Image (spheres, rainbow, N blue to C red):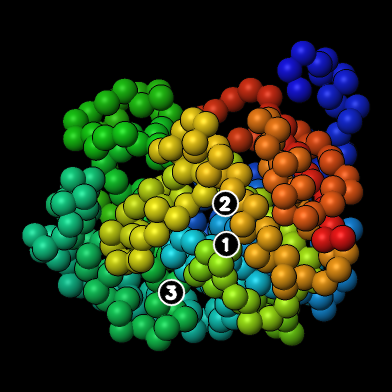
Amino acid sequence: MAGRTQEALYAELDLELSWSEDDLPQTLRTKHVHRLHPYLGKFIPQLVEVFLRRHFAPGQRVLDPFAGSGTTLVEANAYGCHSVGIDISAFNCLLSRVKTSRYSPAALELALRGTLEQARRTGPRESADASGWLREWYSARALGELLSYRAALEALEPGARAVAQVVLSRSARSARLTPHFDLDFPKRPVRAPYWCHKHKRTCSPVDEAEKFLRRYTIDTVRRIREFSLVRNDRVDALVLHADARDVELPVGADGIVTSPPYPGLIDYHEQHRYAYELLGLEDRRGAELGPAERGHRRPAIADYVDGMVAALVNVRRFLPAAAPVVIVVNDSAGLYPAILERSGLRLRERLTRHVNRRTGRRAGEFFEDVLVCSTG
């Protein structure tokens, strides 16, 4: 897109896929369970709403082979579609299951508040047996409070326990020894007062976790209660902790809506390292497609292309002929024409959308491509 005028760029935009801040404020972009836990690199639910309306009918099944934080699955439920999500990250699968599961909000609130109270009564636990990473990134008090809550949640039934694990993870993210303005990409723990770019004053590192556990317990129950008002109990959401390159789906699907990882941008396991450390989740970072740590070197890009082709070829087996495949990417490197051709997907339409808000502190104009394809 370099060298083209802004007027020319905006003339090509699909206006139903691009919004101003006034049209789509953050409260709507992060409605109900979409904000249960911070997640870098997710696409907004309003995009999925448009794709479902354009390409699917209620009662069909939507597949997302790179499910991430579960945006497609949540919106498919609200629209009345069954869904299947696949992700290599155990944390992503936990989060997606929690978002799409059915609960009694009153019973869930009672269980979570009981867990919070049990942890408070127990007090901070000894952290000597915690991993070196946890002891490096948390004060002794904060880590002890997180460990106490982790022990308390084990008494919950499986559904509520999974929700409590998400509350624990979200609290752990906020309780790290990191500057307030650098929660997304912290490089090292901060143990002394620092100048805070967010608050424009000198701040001190966080020394507790209980306040976050309490805050996010309340917020989590509220969001799940809000989603219960639009949740469709007649459709199901299946979440598979698997690799899209070789997964065997137990059911077929009628099409795909997905936003795959961008090469060299985000390390999806590392962004939730605290959850893996606290919850003992299986770490499969070596199987990530396009991790940031590999950068944009030629071998890394070639591996990303090969991986995307393998994933799309594999999941195509579970789709009917002429099924819609909607892919949201920033294809600034021009990788996707070759990926689609090698995957046997036919590009029907290539749309451009303007992204008016971006993750973290990054700024500047940013555009995404929406590749509307079919399997034949």
Residue wearing tag 1: 245
Q: Residue at x 81, y 75 (%)?
A: 60
Residue wearing tag 2: 307
Neighbours of disc 2 within 10 Å: few (<14), some (14-19), many (20+)? some
Whole-percent x and y of residue 335? 68, 37
Residue 231 versus residue 132: which sits nearer the camera?
132
Residue 257, located in which quarter of the rendered image? bottom right
Neighbours of disc 1 within 10 Å: few (<14), some (14-19), many (20+)? some
Q: Earlier in the sequence, mark 2 or mark 3?
A: 3
Residue 106 versus residue 142: which sits nearer the camera?
142
Q: Residue at x 18, y 45 (%)?
A: 136
Q: CA distance from mark 2 to mark 3?
A: 30 Å
Secondary structure of residue under mark 2:
helix
Q: Which circle marks residue 162 in the picture?
A: 3
Residue 302 versus residue 40: which sits nearer the camera?
302
Left or right: where 291 falls relative to 248: left
Q: Are marks 2 and 1 in contact (CB under 8 Å)?
A: yes
Secondary structure of residue under mark 3:
helix
Q: Amino acid at mark 2?
A: Gly
Left or right: where 177 falls relative to 93: left
Query: Is residue 58 positioned above or below 297 on the image?
Result: below
Q: Earlier in the sequence, mark 3 or mark 1?
A: 3
Taking the image as drawn, is residue 64 in sight? no
Whole-percent x and y of residue 31? 65, 56
Q: Earlier in the sequence, mark 2 or mark 1?
A: 1
Query: Is residue 161 positioned above or below 65 on the image?
Result: below
Query: Is residue 124 positioned above or below 356 on the image?
Result: below
